[in-house]
């Protein structure tokens, strides 16, 4: 019995000691090794390239990078990420800042990556990206990634907007109603994919035709016809959603074709994939590039 009490007391002593040490560390009264750890990230951050530092400041303002949470806990990882995403990638992707931020936001919704989405959404607002555009990015993702994913991003966007004193709801952007959404959506499909749409609709089995109707009325009628973003950019976003999700290469191919038809050429599509490499990784990027190369060969 005494042994059990002794063991319990010993465990309690160790637990209390660790708690006290943790509290002292947070307050700045930790041991020398703790102080040394705090200094290390600042030294590590000096490895950022000039371009990476400038891009970081453009996106997030003039802050002490060494005090960024990830830079403090994982300085080497942060340096690699920042130098790659904020310098190397930008040398090979000539998108405008607004376009790049919107495309990244679209990709983060599709992955899904809520934490990074919040960070980039703040950067987008700081760089005068319209709240309407940001909200449309999330809305249009719905028919591609599903409501189960987008509802979290809608709620997070609303929280960010409120924090930035942006009044909700935003101005309505819908241009269709229950009576004309199907016809307007089908017209949009024809603009993007030509007569292939009518052939696919006609060839669909009877028990699947309702899905084709859904595509015209809901996916294209409810979302593509909205204002806030033009059709050419909406089709580019759809390419982004699908390639970022992964596992839908047939649909990636269809929307590469749709983008080429509406004027988003090989160079623009490659620039988009390049901008997304840090966020979606190489397998999905290489799959998309292979499809681009198949439909719009290098010449």
Image (tube, rainbow, N blue to C red):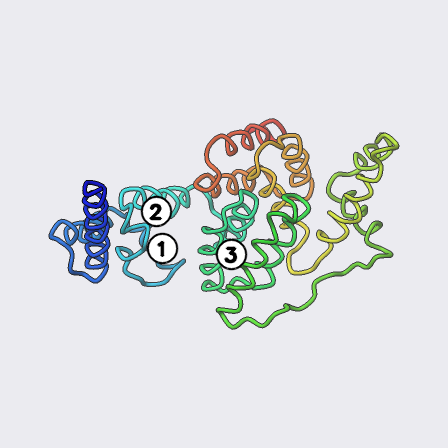
- Residues at marks 1 and 2 touching, judged by CB atoms closer than 8 Å: yes
**In the figure, residue 60 lies in which quadrant?**
bottom left
Residue at image mark 3: 98
Marks 3 and 2, how far apart at CA: 19 Å
Q: Quadrant of the N terminus?
A: top left
Residue 186 in percent (x, y) is at 81, 46
How many numbered dots are placed on residues in this image? 3
What residue is shown with label 1?
56
Q: Residues within 10 Å of mark 3 (few under 14, many from 20)?
A: some
Q: Earlier in the sequence, mark 1 or mark 2?
A: 1
Q: Earlier in the sequence, mark 3 or mark 1?
A: 1
Classify residue 200 by image quadrant: top right
Observer able to see residue 135:
yes
Q: Residues within 10 Å of mark 1 (few under 14, many from 20)?
A: many
Towards the viewer: 149 or 221? 149
Residue beneath label 2, please? Answer: 82
- The foreground one among 148 and 60 is 148
Q: Residues within 10 Å of mark 2 (few under 14, many from 20)?
A: many
- The reply to whether dot 3 and dot 2 touch (C-beta < 8 Å) is no
User: Furthest-left residue in view?
Assistant: 32
Q: Is residue 57 above or below residue 15?
A: below
Tell me if 220 is positioned left or right of 201 in this view: left
Q: Residue 67 appears at what percent x and percent y?
A: 27, 57
The structure residue drawn at horizontal position 14% and vertical position 51%, both measured from the top left corner, is 36
Q: Is residue 299 visible?
A: no
């Amino acid at each position: 019995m005494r042994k059990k009490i002794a063991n319990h007391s010993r465990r309690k002593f160790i637990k209390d000691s660790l708690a006290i040490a943790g509290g002292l560390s947070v307050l700045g009264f930790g041991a020398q090794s703790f102080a040394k750890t705090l200094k290390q990230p600042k030294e590590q951050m000096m490895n950022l390239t000039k371009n990476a530092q400038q891009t970081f400041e453009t996106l997030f303002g003039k802050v002490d990078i060494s005090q960024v949470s990830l830079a403090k806990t994982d300085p080497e990882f942060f340096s690699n990420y920042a130098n790659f995403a904020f310098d190397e990638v930008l040398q090979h992707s000539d998108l405008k800042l607004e376009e790049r931020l919107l495309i990244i936001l679209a990709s983060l919704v599709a992955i899904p990556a809520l934490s990074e989405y919040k960070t980039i959404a703040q950067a987008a607002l700081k760089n005068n990206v319209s709240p309407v555009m940001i909200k449309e990015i999330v809305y249009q993702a719905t028919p591609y990634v599903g409501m189960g994913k987008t509802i979290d991003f809608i709620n997070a966007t609303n929280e960010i907007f409120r924090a930035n004193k942006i009044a909700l709801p935003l101005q309505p952007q819908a241009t269709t109603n229950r009576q004309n959404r199907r016809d307007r959506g089908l017209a949009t499909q024809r603009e993007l994919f030509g007569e292939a749409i009518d052939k696919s609709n006609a060839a669909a089995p009877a028990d699947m035709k309702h899905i084709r109707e859904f595509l015209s009325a809901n996916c294209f009628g409810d979302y593509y016809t909205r204002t806030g973003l033009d059709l050419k950019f909406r089709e580019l976003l759809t390419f982004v959603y699908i390639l970022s999700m992964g596992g839908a290469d047939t649909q990636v191919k269809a929307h590469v074709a749709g983008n080429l038809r509406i004027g988003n050429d090989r160079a623009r599509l490659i620039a988009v994939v390049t901008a997304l490499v840090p966020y979606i990784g190489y397998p999905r990027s290489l799959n998309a590039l292979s499809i681009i190369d198949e439909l719009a060969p290098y010449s």
